[in-house]
Structures are given as C-alpha cells and as structure tokens.
Amino acid sequence: MNKKFWAALALAAALTALAFYLPPQLSRWDDEKIMDEPRVTQLEDREGLADSLRLTVAEKLLLMQGGNLSYLALPGGEAQVRYTIEDASDGVYISSEPEVEGPEENEEEWSVRLAGVRREMLALQRAGALPELWAENVQAELTGSEEVLCIDNDTQLSFLICHMSLTFPNWNVGVSFDQKSGKILSMSLRWLRTQPPSWGAAGTVGFGGAWRDYWGMDSVDPNWNTPRVSEILSASAPLAGNSGDYSAAGEVAFTYDGQTLRAPLYGWCSGGSCAVQWNT
C-alpha cells in the first residue's frame, strides 16, 4: 500500500514539473528550428509589399511638415568632386575638376543627380513655377551636397532626401529633392539686389498651379496669389527702390487626400543681397 502511495505521489510531482517546464522548452526548440531553417520570402511578395508601402511625393511633403520624423545624415553624402553642367550647341555635357579626388562611384552618382536636378528645374521654369534661372550657355556648379534619411517613427517607413548647393554666375540656389522620384521638394534662391532673376512675360501667376501639378496635389488654394505672395516671388519691393533691409513671409496652401500642406514662402534683402525661400 505504501509503495503504491509513494509511486502515485512521485508520478503526480513529475507531471506537475512537466506541465510547468515543458511548454517553454518546446517553444525554445521551435524557435531554434525556425532559425536553423530560414524561410525566404518570394521576390514577388517583397516587391508587392514595397509597392503597397511606397509614399507619394505629396505624402512625403506632408510627413516632412507635420509628421513624427527622425532625420539621419548619411556618411559620405558630401560630394567629393565639383561638377559643372553646361549647355552647348550639340547638347548638354557634365565635367568635373580632375584635381579633386573622390570615390568614382560617388562621382557618378552625384553627376546623375545633378543632371536630374537640371531637368526638373527646366521643367519647373517652363511651367511657371520658377524664374528663368537656366538659359543657353549658362553654367551651374555643384558646390555642396548631402543625403538625409527621413524615418517615420510611427510606421518605420523611410525615404531619402538629397540636398544640393548650386552656384550660377549671378545667383546661388539650394535645392532639396526626393531621391526616389527626383522631384524638387524645397528651394532657396539668392541673388544680387541689382541682378534679380526674371519671371518672364507671364510673371508669377502660374506659380501655385504649377507646383500643385508638379507635386501631385489635389488642389491649391484659389486665393493663393495674394499681394504679399506676389511681392515675395517677384521681389517687387526691393526693385521699387527700397535700398534698406526688407523681409516678408507668406504661404501657399495645398490639399491632398483631405490633408493640408501649408508651404511657407520667405523673402528678404539685406545690403546688396536678396533671397527667396520656398517650402524650406
């Protein structure tokens, strides 16, 4: 009788121990098996996932304005070579200063990006979104560059933004553009007070609609072209003989998918220099 009692008691203790320790151990064994036998996602599945998570230019602009973003400057983003892009009768060519050394891959990458920015700026000029910065036989030199990774802390989606500093004979331009699409997201233009860029015969009346279409927005505020915005874009106050300091601020509102992007616009003059900043 005693032997049966103690045997039953030992069996009960063993079952209790197994019930307590066995499930975690089985889980660990299962995890180890998965790690030892990795499953490779099909290429089509990965591409489909990437397409479903791809952000539009308008969505990136909205995130940059009011999203919960972290910014990471990538190492090696600074261009090691100065490039010159020129218009010639037989086409466009890009040259670099050979005395400046740098990785060949980096040179090629920024060379391609520089040509892309030129195309975008020319398209924006034709649409009335920019003054006439590029013309025949005008050179622009890339004097600075940087890559910044933007990470949405809520979704962990990320996108790459590139910055460029361009020097023209009569003005300097800073551009930020989306690396994926090549679209320009923001700009700053600085010139000598006595040599402002020209908006052409049409002036600035097409500015709002041109940027709406370029960014893929749903609409632009129909009343965007206020006297203040027009004054900032055309630099009419400095040109009217105001030789002192000048500053003004405005905005142009766009809508996309029920959200509003209020793109800021700044203009200022100090001494012999003037500047306009768009969505910076």
Image: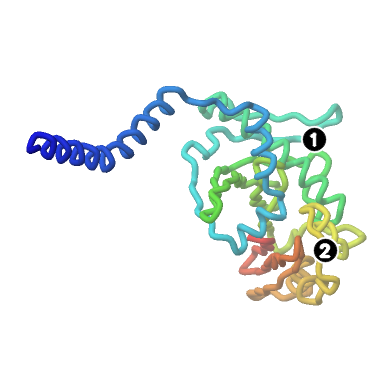
Q: How is the image coloured?
A: rainbow
Q: Is residue 230 above or below residue 38?
A: below
Which residue is denoted by mark 2 in the rendering?
Answer: 219
Q: Give the alpha-carbon distance from disc 1 to disc 2, as whole Å.
A: 35 Å
Residue indicated by mark 1:
87
Residue in the image at 67% along x and 64% along y:
274
Q: Position of residue 25 (x, y in %)?
A: 30, 35
Q: Does residue 114 appear to the left or right of 222 in the view shown?
A: left
Which is more toward the observer, 170 or 56? 56
Question: Three-letter amino acid code at disc 1?
Answer: Asp
Q: Is residue 114 left or right of residue 230?
A: left
Residue extending farthest to the front is 1
In this picture, is 150 found above or below 67?
A: above
**Kind of residue indicated by mark 2:** Ser
Q: Residue at x 77, y 42 (%)?
A: 138
Return the residue found at the far right.
201
Residue found farthest to the left: 2
Q: SS for tag 1? A: strand
Q: Nearer the viewer, residue 144 or 269?
A: 144
Q: Quadrant of residue 208?
A: bottom right
Answer few, some or many: residues within 10 Å of disc 2's Cα (few below 14, many 20 plus, some between 14 and 19): some
Which of the two discs, 1 and 2, labels the residue nearer the N terminus? 1
Is residue 199 toward the left or the right of residue 139 in the image?
right
* Quadrant for the N terminus in the image: top left
Name the residue at 69% across, 46% down: 168
- Quick one: quadrant of the C terminus? bottom right
- Tell me residue 141's x, y (percent): 65, 40
**Dot 1 alpha-carbon crowd within 10 angstroms: few under 14, some 14 to 19, many 20 or more:** some
Residue drawn 28% across the image and 41% down it = 19
Query: x, y percentage for residue 5?
Result: 12, 39
- In this rendering, is residue 238 above or below 185? below
